[in-house]
Image (cartoon, helix red, strand yellow):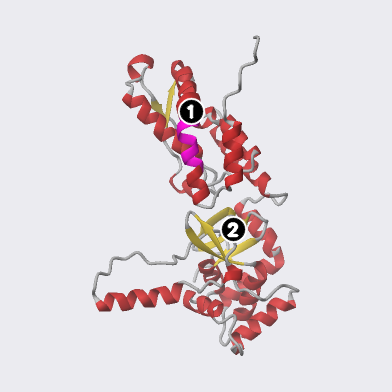
Amino acid sequence: MASPLCATANLIIPENESSRVGHHINQLKRLDKMQKQSSPVIAEQQLRLDLQVAAELEIDGVGMGVLTDGTPFLTLRGLSRMSGADIAAIVRITADWQLSPLRPREQKIRELVRAQGADDSVAFYAVMRNGVVNHIVPPAVCMAILEYYAFEARGDNEQAAKSFRLLARKGFTDFIYAQVGYNPSGAPNIAWQQFHDRVTLAYHTVPVGYFSIFKELADIFVMLIRKGANLGPSFVPDISVGILWAKHWANENLEVLYGPRIKYEHNYPLYFPQAASNPQQPYCYPDDALGEFRKWVREVYLPKRMPGYLSDKVRQGQLTATVATAALEAFEPPKSIKGR
């Protein structure tokens, strides 16, 4: 197996397979077997609704990332890839973590976790993202499983040994922070860094005489971040605005008034999943239409569309209701001063 260690972060293991199996008994049996192999049972203490994935990336099958509290992690499949162990074996370890008495394998791995001075009570955390459960394996458990397969399990496992030595040498936390571009000073700064990275890539990419949706929404991005929104790969307001504005542009036949829109090159940071299809080719619009766009944002998008967009983010677990409310209040138009 080629080494995956130039790699990083998030791979979601589905909780429910969506295959249409009808009433065919053999298909049902195969589906049941797949679910048992790929979906670990989640105990109450493992479900962390207070946390979100702040940064993530995947390269060569290894899923890594960082939670909003700064905890680095591997996904179950990422750990499987780095350890050289089958995904079913990794899932069985997590499933047997709480058995009493423990089996020898799980007992040894938990001893290795405690030897790091870490809590061995849970094998993974379940974190919601876009309505889907992400299985997050914390650092001590990752290192213990890698050490077990590298030096304790029967047979030679060169992949596990290489991974363990790499992470031990560089430090698990530092390695993953560097891979996903995480700013260790705190979650709010991650949002600022991601915004900064997008602005840097978008600088001077729009042809003279045109404006882009992303750059025109800079003040909205800034306000959302200031109110506590963790903007990132799955929270990209300019996509929503761009789609709605394009419909308005076409429905109102604005090209007749302002001239044609054109496409330009737009790139996402490499740690964004959208970067896989870089360069993007969104539309930019004639400068003469800028006043029209700003009026549409002020009178249509902010009061009529933004509330629904933020509500969706709250339902998806990407935004708290408190932050959404604070943002909407901030976007309310200022009241005129009496007597002026």
Residue 37 image position (x, y, % from top left): 44, 76
Q: Is residue 19 visible?
A: yes
Mainly helix, strand or loop, the magenta region?
helix
> What amino acid type should be assigned to the residue bearing mark 1?
Ser
Residue 146 image position (x, y, % from top left): 61, 75
Q: What element carries label 2?
A: strand
Residue under the image location 48 percent in, 26 percent down = 297
Label placed on residue 65? 2
Residue under the image location 34 percent in, 19 percent down = 255
Tag 1 residue: 212
Q: Nearer the viewer, residue 150 or 38?
A: 38
Label placed on residue 93? none
Q: Can residue 210 be seen in this view?
A: no
> What amino acid type should be assigned to the residue bearing mark 2?
Gly
Residue 227 image position (x, y, % from top left): 64, 39
Residue under the image location 76 percent in, 74 percent down = 117
Residue 19 image position (x, y, % from top left): 32, 66
- In the rendered view, would you say 316 is above or below 159? above
- In the rendered view, would you say 207 is above or below 14? above
The magenta segment: 301-310
Q: Is mark 1 on a helix, strand or loop?
A: strand
Residue under the image location 58 percent in, 85 percent down = 99
Q: Which of 14 and 50 is in front in this view?
A: 50
